[in-house]
Amino acid sequence: MQLVLPYLLFAFIIAYILQTVLIFIGTHRLNYPRTKRLQTISVLVALRDEETTVAACVNSLLKLDYP
């Protein structure tokens, strides 16, 4: 039993390192297609009794320059 534990620990360490390397390689291989056209989005603003501030809110949303 005493001889098995060091080998078992070594196997777990190697498996952990291998898993970490494979995850790192897998996440860097993801290539998202780049499009020239920006995607359209929708913005929802929840308002209730906000007649005095809705115009300023809409104007500030229109001024956004994202991304």
Image (cartoon, rainbow, N blue to C red):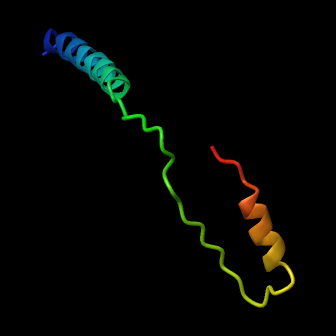
Percent position of residue 8, x then y: 18, 17
**Residue at the outermost front position:** 37
Left or right of residue 54, residue 9 in this image? left
Query: Which quarter of the figure has residue 63?
Result: bottom right
Image position, residue 4 (x, y; %): 14, 13
Which residue is found at the position 75% from the left and 70% from the top?
58
Furthest-right residue in view?
52
Task: Give the left or right position of residue 17, taking residue 48 as reference.
Answer: left
Residue at 20%, 15% in the rendered image: 11
The residue that appears at 18% across and 11% down in the rendered structure is 7
Which quadrant is home to the C terminus? top right
Residue drawn at (66%, 79%), measured in percent from left and top?
Answer: 46
Q: Is residue 16 above or below residue 6?
A: below
Frontmost residue, 63 versus 3: 63
| On screen, residue 3 above or below 44 | above
The x and y percentages for residue 36 are 47, 38
- Asked if 15 appears above or below 6 in the picture, the reply is below
- Residue sitting nearer the eye, 52 or 22: 52
Give how far across and how far down residue 61 sits, in percent.
72, 63
Q: In the displayed structure, does residue 24 sit left or right of residue 49?
A: left
Name the quadrant of the N terminus: top left
Count of marks overlaid on the render: 0
39, 11: nearer the viewer: 39
